[in-house]
Image (spheres, rainbow, N blue to C red):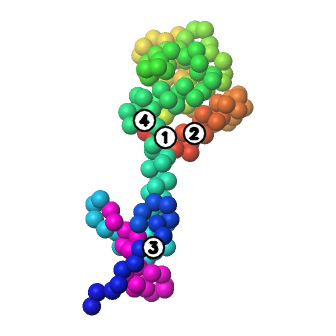
Amino acid sequence: MESPREVLPNLGYLPLRTDDVADEGGDTVVTVPNDDGDLTGPQKALHRALREVRAAQDRRSRWPDDGREAMTKLARLFPSLAKCPGITPWDQEAVLGWLCAEEAPTVAAATAATFVLTVWNSFIDWREPAREMRFAVPDRASRFDILAAMTTWTPNDVTAARAWVDAPFWP
């Protein structure tokens, strides 16, 4: 025998149908229409999961899908990188060259540059390509140091880094 279905409040994102059936915890089982097929489960758990998916989609939507465009958007948030070449369009070799040039950027700018290079590729030691490209001071491309960043960055640089921490992407 088929249960009656009713429309529940959509809680701001999707319409729900209920089968008026309770699971062991007494939570109503609901069905949520989805492009890939309906999702059915306990209402509270399904709402929680859908909120998490929506939050993840929201975080991802803050950055362009193209990795280089996302890096440009991130790097442009750092006031200390205003004079750094290679930001628009994103060119990690130009950023690395600026970081490791004979004329040193400020400590805040150097730390911001190591941050964005680390977001671009956290698996390499940036000193190695700096040495291979024969940049003047390759050791300036050491690993990003959050403690050094927090002691040298302006509040606006910190806000820029928080934008990535809140909604990380990997290009």
The mark nearer the N terminus, 2 or 4, is: 4
The mark nearer the N terminus, 3 or 1, is: 3
| Residue type for callout 4 | Pro
Q: Tag 4's secondary structure?
A: loop
Is disc 4 surrounded by few (<14), some (14 to 19) or many (20+) residues within 10 Å? some
Per the model, the C-alpha gap separating discs 2 and 4 is: 14 Å
Per the model, the C-alpha gap separating discs 3 and 4 is: 34 Å
Where is residue 27 shown, x and y percent of the image?
48, 81
| Residue type for callout 1 | Arg
Write down the residue under mark 3. 8
Per the model, the C-alpha gap separating discs 3 and 1 is: 30 Å
- Residue 62, numbered label: 1
Residue 36 in magenta stretch: no
Image-based side of 164 in relation to 66, left or right: right
| Residue type for callout 2 | Ala
Where is residue 69 shown, x and y percent of the image?
42, 29
Q: What stretch is highlighted in magenta?
A: 16-34
The mark nearer the N terminus, 1 or 2, is: 1
Disc 1 vs disc 2: Cβ atoms closer than 8 Å?
yes
Foreground: 12 or 27? 12
The mark nearer the N terminus, 3 or 2, is: 3
Q: Comparing marks 3 and 4, which lies closer to the viewer?
A: 3
Write down the residue under mark 4. 64
Write down the residue under mark 2. 163
Q: Comparing marks 1 and 2, which lies closer to the viewer?
A: 1
- Name the magenta segment's main secondary structure: strand
Is disc 1 surrounded by few (<14), some (14 to 19) or many (20+) residues within 10 Å? some
